[in-house]
Image: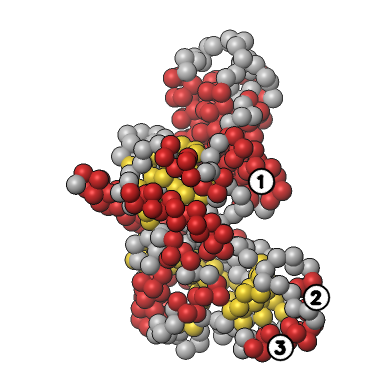
Amino acid sequence: MADTLVATEVDSIEADSIETMSRALDAAPLDLGLHTRMLAALRAAHDVAGSAAHELALAAFGMLGATHGDHSTHQPTPQHALVLYNIATVYAMNGRRKEAIRWYRIALEIDPALAIAHQNLAATLDREGLADEARVHRERAYRLQRVFVDRALGTETLRVLILGVGHGTGNVPIDALLDAQTTTRIRYAIDCAGDAEDAQLPPHDVVFNGIGDADVAAPLAARLARFADFAARRERPLLNALDAIARTHRHRLGELLDGVPDVIVPRCVRLDARPSNEAALAAQLAQSQLTLPLLLRPLAAHGGEGVTLHASLDSLWRALADLDAPCYLTAFHDFRAADGHYRKYRTLFVAGEPHPYHLAISRHWMVHYFSADMAGSPWKLNEEQHFLADPRAALGTRAHEAIRAIGARLGLAYGGVDFTLTADGRVLVFEANATMLAHRETPHGPFAHKNRYVERIIDAFGRMLRDAGDAGDAGAAR
């Protein structure tokens, strides 16, 4: 990439294809002429997210005093890197991870000390399965700073402080739920910060506890409790209370949902250490009333990472030999339907209210939306649309009411449940916690039908935050 602010000779480019523009911008990411032509190409392709990213970049470059005819040889500045970071962030917020990674990397070539770019790049790399590279950028980010502020792009109406962890995963992925135009996001890596830094935080209206994984939150319990006391003294509401998160440990979920009609929670135990031998393992399973087959899941694992199914004690024993950390063992229920497919529904809760989010249908017991060939199966998409449009009709009244009851038991400001239906119409719970992902789909893609329902979730989330902020302001004024 060019290391000076030099305009590319755009006349040498014969076709304004998006691919051509992308290659040219890799070489000259600060060239306003190229951004202008890329914007035109993206608009012609009806690419809303891409158009917004480059339109934002052109406006920001203009505020820095650059013009389309500027052939200055001045060195790029951190302000230029921030413009490119914003391009990446628009892509990331729209689920366009590959484009986001590309632009974050370009921004960091100009300003390697841009901590927020390291942080967002790490999160995006994690979602792409590039954990080792993500870890490098995350460590760089939190060595540089612990507080990251994404200011509202338009008129600010709300300032949200988001508690998160810098080391590891477990944060609630709420970026897509926040209105970038009106909401200033203040992300705080509290595990990397001392108590004294709490008092130095920027002003904020409401606190959202984004450490949604109970296994990640548990070692930070004392630190988080001290912060909760600090927030209470400042009369700032804290959403997703610490005790509500703690109740969502996988091995405690059965106790939490005990007594909810028409709900089945598979028996689950936490194994903190490998038993001394296979016989000791068998005895421990018997004491826990667990029978094969069993699912083995590492702690703080999401998206099916590291999850294995074991039908024999020998298989489970050998798998435990390769595991160097605590894990969960969960009874496996064969939830295959009569048509031979496995179904996994997701409902999200905002202030306890259920909102259908998606349905994935697969031939494999490990059901993932991205691997279930949803896009290539019109009948699957039709079934999903039926669930989204009328969850009561799709699930049946008993199951629909059971889902509503699960939301009430969770007591989370934001969370969700992954589940399926049994043959007799009951709800079989896979997990219920705060770590549930929600995001918009590409407007003209195969999953665009989901966006109207995602917008409802985003609107409900925004109303909840504003109501909490207003309540905090009223309390502080008394």
Residue 97 lies in what quarter of the image?
top right
Hey, what amino acid is under mark 3?
A: Ala
Residue at horizontal 59 percent and vertical 79 percent from the top: 268
Number of dots carrying numbers = 3
Answer with left or right where residue 220 lies relative to residue 263: right
Q: Nearer the viewer, residue 321 or 39?
A: 321
Sequence order check, earlier mark of 3 and 2? 3
Kind of element beneath mark 3: helix
Q: Does residue 25 sit above or below 298 in this rendering?
A: above
* Nearest-to-viewer mark from 3 and 2: 3
Q: Distance between the residues labelled 3 and 2?
A: 16 Å
Which image quarter is the N terminus in? top right
Residue 445, image x, y percentages: 52, 52
The colour scheme used here is: secondary structure
Badge 1 element: helix
Check disc 3 and report the residue beneath it.
Answer: 283
Q: Label 1 is placed on what type of residue?
A: Ala
Residue at the spot of label 2? 318
Place residue 451 in its image quadrant.
Answer: bottom left
What is the spatial separation of the Cα atoms under label 3 and label 1, in whole angstroms? 40 Å
Mark number, residue 134? 1
Residue at horizontal 60%, vertical 70%?
367
Q: How crowded is mark 3: few (under 14 residues within 10 Å), some or many (20 or more)?
A: few
